[in-house]
Amino acid sequence: MSLLQIKNLSVEFGSEKNPFRAVEGLDLSVDQGEIVGIVGESGSGKSVTMMAMMGLLEGQGRIVADELTFDGKNLLTISARERRKIVGKDIAMIFQDPMTSLNPSYTVGYQIMEVLKVHQGLRGAELRARALELMELVEIPAAKTRLEAYPHQLSGGMSQRVMIAVALACNPKLLIADEPTTALDVTIQAQIMDLLVNLQKERNMALLMITHDLAVIAEVAHRVAVMYAGQVAEEGSVPQLFRHPVHPYTQALLSSIPEHSKGARRLVTLPGIVPGQYDRPSGCLLSPRCPYAQERCRNERPGITAHEHGAVRCFYPLFEKKEAP
Amino acid sequence: MFFFILRRLGVLIPTFFGITLITFSLIRMIPGDPIEVMMGERSLDPALHAAAMKRLGLDQPLYIQYFDYIGNLFQGNLGASLKTQQSVWSEFTTLFPATLELALCALVFATVCGLLAGVVAAIKRGSIFDHGVMGISLTGFSMPIFWWGLILIMLFSVQLGWTPVSGRLDLAFDVQPQTGFMLIDAWRAEMADPEYNAGAFKDAVMHLILPAIVLGTIPLAVIARMTRSSMLEVLREDYVRTARAKGLSPARVIFIHTLRNALIPVLTVIGLQVGTLMGGAVLTETIFSWPGIGKWLIDAIGRRDYPVVQNGILIVATLVILTNFIVDILYGIANPRIRHAK
């Protein structure tokens, strides 16, 4: 059984009459010890999915799903109190901008110890020792003095390490990293990624990596889900999906990596933007931007269908490589 | 921290000169002079008037009078009231506890209710409670103090008879002023002579309630609105999301992670309200016949009692400045980013 199982998840915002579906019919499963990547453009619903699962939408979004279970517990029906026992303990999350994700009014030590106090009931010297241990685990130099530091005294990379320490405090089974390196310098990005991957291996926890950096996914993830406009467009194992993308969107995404257009005069791009609340097409959500779109694509919404190596949401998946017309 | 304090102190010096200049000139711009007001202008013999003015040094050119005033200030001499011949300082210290008691109670009332209303309004944003609180606080903020005071007296004192109309304590009690704070003095008197002074403390509280509410209304409105908007801003911060992602209880998220940061601007506003309280005390004390600094200053202006007006206002202004100064330091404690800026 999967550690995290999501089936047909939808998240709606706005009024009942005129809702905006940020996530629509999303299926996703994560096994223990697995690294799953979620990629997609801005506004494709990657973060909202995770926020919905963790109960961080604070009643702003309406969440509907056939199944939303973590470690055998149904996240749809448990009370807020029960959920708080899981969130921060068994499921932990780190965010995009570490500099603003730490509370400026409290020391780093306080913010690490807080989780330990709330979830594990540690006190006194034991609490301090464990916090120090975590700081050393995430390779923060001079950990002892840094316990008393305030977030504004740390660099972005250090702050993200602190966030990771907070997340790992209670040995989570699943760590969700929401674009953990986007706000960092390139050199620091590599360090943080290495740290995350090493910790994942060491502890055999599941890691859900949300990013729009395909290179990161190609390097670290086992499986990947490509999201577009709140739906999973394609899902599969990393080598397979990168070698033979079958969804037109995945193909476009991969060919827009600068390294792939060496020699070409212009960077390949997919024209248009992700549809918003008011310009959602009635057919396939990609149809206005898809070079292969046909009449059926403009009128009907494709469902997600499994194939040999994964799953794809397209009427005409590109099993043989075609050149864009 | 030391240099932080020193730098703030340096800014105060020009402020003090500004205050002396303004009070000195304003009180002299009001027509009439102390002698005229005392004697009545019709029956006053010009020769006597001139002699009295000379005796008080008021016949000198204005700039000489000003320099005399400043010179005295530098020697720590605040002068004496023209009417009572008592030193301004001793009159001030006698009356100040009454104002302080009133202002403190008003501030506590405003802060407690304002913070609570602001926090709840922010959490229940867009609800009836939110709109209600914001509507009422806008009304409270726009209400003239003297009118609001009279309305409350009409309703609670005259119609319902729940509270006394004016003063600090019923005449029936035998309470010796020891601390100057009526709540404390009445309590001690009641303890000392439980039979004769039975109910003195309760009577002091009843006298205090209405003026404290009237004086605290504007600060309450300001604090509630400021708390609400500050809370709403902080609730959107990434670190509040982090706090929730840590699985902390809603109470912890609100009070430890949100309110602590939201308090920073509110603290400044509370500090600024001390000025409003002093200004409001003048009106409130007049309406409720509260024997404090406000009433003292109003009477002194009426008598053209130059030393009392000049130095009384200077003392009050100094207190307001000092409070804001303390707030600045508290601000540094609440916000580590400011404390560390060298």
Image: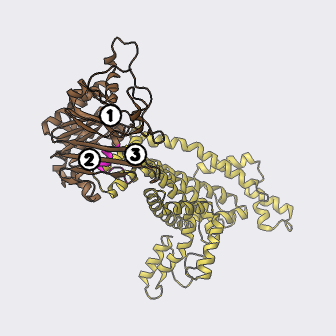
Chain colours: A brown, B yellow
Instruction: Answer left or right for B266 relative to B23.
Output: left
Query: Against A53, is A142 above or below?
Result: above
Please identify the quarter of the rendering in which residue B319 is found. Answer: bottom right
Q: Which residue is mark 1?
A: A315
Which of discs 1 and 2 lies nearer the camera? The answer is 1
Looking at the picture, which amino acid does disc 1 mark? Answer: Phe
Q: Residues within 10 Å of mark 3 (few under 14, many from 20)?
A: many
* Marked residue nearer the N-terminal end (3 or 1): 3
* Magenta span includes A53: yes
Looking at the picture, which amino acid does disc 2 mark? Answer: Lys
The residue positioned 76% from the left and 67% from the top of the image is: B38
Looking at the picture, which amino acid does disc 3 mark? Answer: Arg
Q: Which residue is mark 3?
A: A21
Residue farthest to the front, as pictured: A295
Residue A279 spot, x, y in % from top left = 47, 39
Instruction: Answer left or right for A128 relative to B207.
Output: left
The main secondary structure of the magenta stretch is: helix
Q: Residues within 10 Å of mark 1 (few under 14, many from 20)?
A: some
Q: Which mark is residue A7?
A: 2
* Magenta span includes B77: no
Residue B57 seen anywhere in this rendered image of the structure: no
Q: Are labels 1 and 2 on one chain? A: yes
The C terminus of chain B, quarter of image? top left
**The residue marked by circle 1 belongs to what chain?**
A
Mark pair 3, 1: CA separation:
22 Å
The residue positioned 58% from the left and 57% from the top of the image is: B276
The N terminus of chain B, quarter of image? top left
* Marked residue nearer the N-terminal end (2 or 3): 2
Stretch of the chain drawn in magenta: A48-58
Query: Against B175, is B279 above or below?
Result: above
Mark pair 2, 3: CA separation:
16 Å
The residue positioned 66% from the left and 58% from the top of the image is: B309
